[in-house]
Amino acid sequence: MAGETQTVSEYIVHHLTNLTYGKLPAGYERYDGSVVGEGGAWVMAHGGEEAAAMGFNAIHVDSMAWSIGLGILFCWLFRRMAVKATSGVPSGMLNAVEMIVDFVDGTVRDTFHGRNKLVAPLALTIFVWVFLMNLMDLIPVDLIPHTMMLLGVDYHKIVPSTDPNITMGMAVGVFILMLYYSIKVKGFGFVKELTLNPFNHWVFIPVNLFMEVVGLLAKPFSLGLRLFGNMYAGEMIFILIAALFSAGLAWAVPAGLLQIGWAIFHILVITLQAFIFMVLTIVYLSMAHEDH
Amino acid sequence: MNINLTLIGQMVAFVCFVVFCMKYVWPPLLAAMQEREKKIADGLAAADRANHDLELAKEKAVERLKEAKGEAAGIIDSANKRASQIVEEAKQAATVEADRVKASAQAEIEQETNRAREQLRAQVAALSLAGAEKVLGKSIDKSVHAELVDQLASEL
């Protein structure tokens, strides 16, 4: 919560800053006045400015930790259920896991008509992992960052999918798979698709190539940025509502109600976004497999 | 909102989790689910078959019952017939027996009558002889007239 020493905008910025570990360039003057020596230095960034100065040579420790942690949770849970699964009567957690698997399997069957052993597990991983990452949005915004602050960690952002690095990382992974299967399935046909569509004449090759490449690149960008945008906006609203609490006791009740209302609505959003990411991945891969 | 090494890190993690899922999660789960699906389908098919069998058995039972009823009716019929036949036979036998008894009785009666008549005749002969003897007064030779009287008696 915005304390006495923090303005609302500071509070919001604090919530939107990742815990960053990276390499500061040589000659950078740090927050405490010390100057980074020759060859730069790998340090924890203190605030957004330092993180920005690090450029590409930085890693968001909180995003990575939560993302990998949730991925491991997914793998552990599903692996345990996979070991437990028999053809007998399923029960408890196994039922839920099988329901998800069946749902993903059905979606893949409906959308993807080629033969590929990778697509279904890929879709399952994306769906559950993205859902879990989005689910972090429902944890009260101050709970973990504030706890971490008390433990001495200045910045902490617990929703990995509000970090464009995370969503784009997955989107780029999907994009690489798309390129790989396009070339594998279509071979030279892929080049033809890029150059002779939509105007089937050699004169139009540059025009076609431009349009097709833009269309192709739009896919991973829309995939990654859609998830990021939705989750970022949702998180932002949670933070803004939380900031209301600092406006005095009179605001506490409406803010609390708003928080609950938005959280309930957000349950829909996080599930929907996970589902959309999964379906679009399947559709894109399906398109990569289609030979015209 | 800087693009940095996190992107690469996430890609690597993504690949690792997908590979793990593809190797260790998806195949056993799907295999178990498909096996169960097959088991359930088999069970349903077996239940259907059992139902069908039951239907057939019911039909067969009804048929058997009908057959048995027919057979029973036949048996009762023939038994009835046999019974009436026996009664008829008994009746006939009884009539014959009655006739026989009647005939023998009649024969006996006749015999008795004849004997009585013989006796009567002999007595009549003796009486008439005795009467005649009394009428004629000892003049009649018994032996001479006996033949005559006998003849007379036989004419009675």
Image (spheres, rainbow, N blue to C red):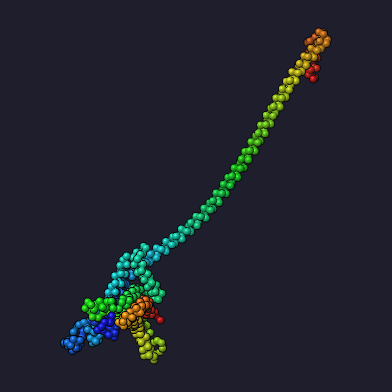
Q: Return the residue found at the far top.
A: B138
Relative to residue A98, is residue A257 depicted above or below? below
Q: Quadrant of the C terminus of chain B?
A: top right
Residue B15 figure quarter = bottom left
Q: Residue furthest bottom?
A: A203
Q: Is residue B93 above or below residue A182?
A: above
* Residue B139 or residue A265, whichever sits in front: A265
Quadrant of residue A180 in the image?
bottom left
At x 78% / y 14%, what residue is drawn? B127
Which residue is outermost to the right? B136
**Residue A201 shows up from this direction:** yes
Question: Percent position (x, y) of residue A98?
Answer: 36, 68
Occupied quadrant, residue A219: bottom left
Could you say where residue B103 lies in the image, as x and y percent from the top left? 70, 29
The residue at 44%/60% (across/down) is: B46
Identify which residue is drawn at 55% across, 51% down: B66
Residue A14: x and y, percent?
Answer: 27, 83
Q: Nearer the viewer, residue A15 or A240?
A: A240
Q: Is residue B43 left or right of residue A45?
A: right
Residue at image location 64% in from the left, 36% down from the top:
B90
